[in-house]
Structures are given as structure tokens and as C-alpha cells.
Amino acid sequence: MKRTRLKRRGGLGRIAERLVWLANGLTESGSRVEDRYWDQQLSSTIDANLADDEEEALNAALDHLYSTEPRAYDELADFIESRAECAAGAFSTHDVVLVAAPILAWSRYRIPASSIPPAVLANLRVHLQAHVLAKGARLALADFLFSPDQLPQGYCATAEFAKVLGTAAMDNHDLRISTEGMPETAQFLSDTRYLLAAVAVPRGAALFRWQEDDGSRDTARDQWRTQGGACLAPLLPGCAIDLVLPESYFAASRAADKDSRPYSIRASVAFLGTALETPAANLRAVIAPFWDRQLEEYRVGITVRGSDQVVHGVVWPLLGAEDDSTDCAAQIEAVLRECGVNDVVHLDHQFPLEYCDDCGAPMYPSPEGEVVHAEMPEDRAEQMPRHLH
């Protein structure tokens, strides 16, 4: 996923230099004919680097272009993502793509990341093929509901996973995931879970339902939320869930990152309404920007009206091309007001990115303009997850 990148020291290696040269060539191309040349060169070079596990070279080229040639950075990032999620050219006769179906969830209890029973997997397959995928698409589902920490880490690992799951898709079989050695999942009030799949179609054929003449994204999204949500809800007991439209891996992940920001605010207001037995109109929100070398995120400290104690906090990270010129604070306020929180305070001070030394939780802005630890009242603290999004 494309993120804000910090430039590293040191010169570019040979592989990264070639990637930079190819990306700049594509950016400066003056015709579709020339585009095709650069496309082919970039694709074959990236495929070779993914196969050779050249993760550092890929990131070095991206880091360099991020600060020097934004257009070339976008081109290279798109190519690397595409080649990784399409299994690095491992299939000659079919188009294969790794697909993610994100699930936004919140709960006062632990949000599960667990294996998916065969019967549930079979139902999910039926609804994906009926509502999301193009007619005749072959499908393989991974039989595990992944937390963000359990997803493939990096482009090379993503390409390898896409190859394995894509091979299963060619046979129209699902894939069993071994949970041995899988990272532990941190506990958050709201978080995302991922259903992963691979889709295979003959080269050049439609992958998704909305590519067909009588299909649309909106219809696919609505049907998936209704039918897929009914299948997934039993896997997430005690959770409120919302489903993001399944798409290619990186696009779906970015959509989940974006949708999770307002979702986490709505979850927080709903949680506090239950935990503190107080209506949203009785809450006050303090919004402030938090900086490192540049603006990284907004944080929202929430208090109960009449008290300055921050009882809860929400992080709203900047994504993609967002920066200090993007009016994220207004977006946050709009979501809060939709939830019924009408007392909203904006702080303009540039706060540093501070975290608790003991538990690592973010520090949140208080009405007095300080950064503090979010602490529930003592008689309610046992109901609170330790970490918050």
C-alpha cells in the first residue's frame, strides 16, 4: 500500500537505479506505442525482482522517487503493486489477481482472527461468485480471517502468497492456512479483518461482476454486505461489522484504511454510550494535528462534558497524498456531528507523536491543550480494551 515514505540515506543500487530510470521513462513517454515499451520493461524487471526477493531495491527506488519525482513514484508504485498482487507473471494463460475482502469490526471484547470452517467457506464462495466475480471466474479462498499483522509483509511476500493462492484458484480449490507461527493479534476496540482470495480468468476476460454489462459496483457492494455479512457475522461474535467491497488486494486494503477512520469514530461513540451510559450529546471531542517531520495524523481526545479527563481516543492517520493542506479536521468533525457529538474543539498546536512509555498507546489531546493518556473512570476501566485505534 502506498504510504508516506521517509527518504533513506545512501546511494541507489544498480537494481533501484534501473527501476527509477524505467519509471521516469514511462512518465516522460509521449505516445501509447512508447508506453507499451516501458510497460513491458518495467513488468519484466519488477517480476524478476519480486522472484529474487529484492524487497530493499524496490523500496529504495520508491523512496528516491517519492521525494524527487512524484509522478514517476505513482507509476512505479502502481506497477509494483499490480505485479505483486498478480503473482509476478507466474501464469501464462490466465489473469490471476489476489483479492481482499476487508471487514471493519468493533467490539468491547477481543475481535477474533481465526480459521474459517468449511461450511462457511463454501457459503462465502457462493456469494462471491454470485455477486462480486464475473461469470466463469475461478476462485480460491484462504480459510483464515486475517488481522492486519498477519497479512503478507512486503511486496515480495505478497507476490509469493498470490502465486500460491493463485495456483489453488486455477484448480478452483480453496487453500488451507497453517496457523503455526502466525503473529499474535493486538487487541483494539475497532479493527479490520481480511478474507483473502485469488481469482483466475482467461487472459483478458472480466474479473469482477461490475465489468459486465449488467453489473455495477454499488449493486455488488450492497449484495456482498447483505449476503456476505450474514456468512461472516458468526465468525465475529460480539462484534458490530461492516463490509468493504472486495477488490484487488492493494485497492481493497487502501479502501479499508480510508473507511476505517470514520468507522473507528462511530465505534468509539457507540462504545462510550454503552460503557459510560451517556448519550453522544454528552461527549466532547478535542481534535489536534500530530507531527513528526511532517503532519502524520490527527488524534481525537474524547471527554464527558463537564470533565477534562480524556476517557477515550481515536487516531485518524493521513493516507496517500493527504498533507497539512487537506482539511481532515473538518471531515473528523463532520463524522462526530453525524454521531451526535456537538461539542467539538479544534487545537492548532503542532503536537509531537507521543506514545505511552508503559503500554505504547498513543497520547491524546486534552481540552487544556496537553497530550495525555486516555483513562476510563476506575469503575469502568475493566470494560476497556487496552489499546485503541
Image (tube, rainbow, N blue to C red):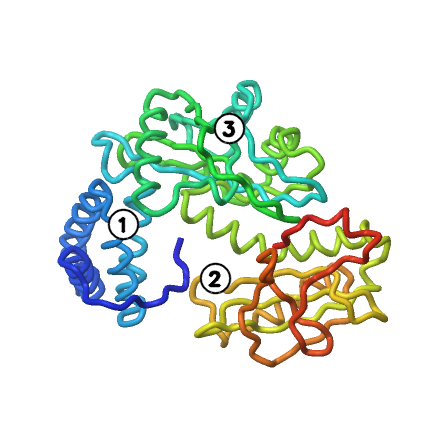
Q: Secondary structure at mark 3?
A: helix
Task: From the viewer's side, name the closer residue of 33 and 232.
Answer: 232
Amino acid type at circle 1 is Glu
- Farthest front residue in view: 358
Coordinates of residue 87 in the picture (x, y in percent) = 29, 37
Coordinates of residue 240 in the picture (x, y in percent) = 69, 41
Q: Is residue 364 left or right of residue 20?
A: right
Q: Which mark is residue 55?
A: 1
Coordinates of residue 2 in the picture (x, y in percent) = 39, 57
Q: Secondary structure at mark 1?
A: helix
Q: Earlier in the sequence, mark 2 or mark 1?
A: 1
Task: From the viewer's side, name the closer residue of 210 and 172.
Answer: 172
Q: Is residue 207 left or right of residue 24?
A: right
Query: Measuring 81% from the left and 49% from the top, which residue is drawn there?
Result: 274
Q: Is residue 382 left or right of residue 120?
A: right
Camera-nearest label, 2 or 1: 1
Amino acid type at circle 2 is Leu
The residue that mark 3 highlights is: 130
Query: Measuring 58% from the left and 42% from the top, which residue is drawn there?
Result: 243
The residue that mark 2 highlights is: 319
Task: From the viewer's side, name the closer residue of 357 and 25.
Answer: 357
